[in-house]
Image: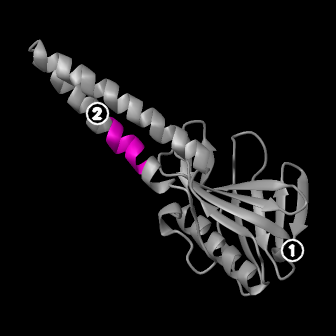
Amino acid sequence: MQVSGAGAATSYAYKASLIGSAHRFELTEEGLSWHIAGRSGLWRYDEISAIRLSFRPVSMQQHRFRADVSHKGGGRIAILSTSWQTAALMAPQDNGFRDFLIELHARMAKAGSRAELTAGLGRRTYAAVLAFLAVLAVAMAGLLIRALMIGEFAGVLFILGFAALFVWQVGGFVRRNQPQSYSFEQVPRALLP
């Protein structure tokens, strides 16, 4: 699953699951050519209506990125930065994914695309995540104060350790997925591997 670029065409492929064929994409002179699960198509660069970049870690791969590409006719395809290799191994394809998306943006800009370029989660989803984290922080602070008041220092250490692990794991997701708009020239590096 690699990117190859020889002037006219750049390609990228990944396996979304162990079962089934690879999802293959190619940037040609005509547009974005894609082959997914027996279906295929060609979207001209000026027909792509939107791209949303996001950081989407999963249990098997904590460093995974996603690009959702939408067509003005209503279709949408997802491009992931990881590929399944075995039942227990999901391999990153950082360089290939990044190079493919940078080239896609460059070709869309050259074609005069007016696509909506967004990054991160949707604004409502992001607000809901922040509200949930605020409630969780208040609850954890309450537990910490209670543990301190009754002198349960093992509980205090557990709460502090859990909070540090949680901030480390969730903090990067929240920081990278902050909703924003961007331009073809300013693709957000935090959402590319």
Residue 64 visible from this viewpoint: yes
Please state which amino acid type lies under the numbered disc 1: Arg
Judged by depth in the image, the label closer to the viewer, 1 or 2, is 2
**Image side of residue 21 versus residue 133, left or right:** right
Which one is in front, 144 or 81?
A: 144
Q: Residue furthest left?
A: 151
Magenta stretch: helix, strand or loop mostly: helix
Disc 2 on helix, strand or loop? helix
**Residue position for label 1:** 44
Which range is magenta?
A: 166-172
Residue drawn at 51 percent across, 53 percent down: 177
- The quadrant in which the N terminus is found is bottom right
**Image side of residue 92 versus residue 6, left or right:** left
Residue 27 locus on image (x, y percent): 77, 74
Residue 175 locus on image (x, y percent): 43, 53
Residue drawn at 21 percent across, 31 percent down: 160
Disc 1 on helix, strand or loop? loop
Q: Residue furthest top?
A: 150
Tell me if residue 46 is in the magenta stretch. Answer: no
Tell me if residue 169 is in the magenta stretch. Answer: yes
Which one is in front, 193 or 190?
A: 190
Residue drawn at 18 percent across, 22 percent down: 145
> Which label was assigned to residue 25?
none
Residue drawn at 71 percent across, 67 percent down: 116
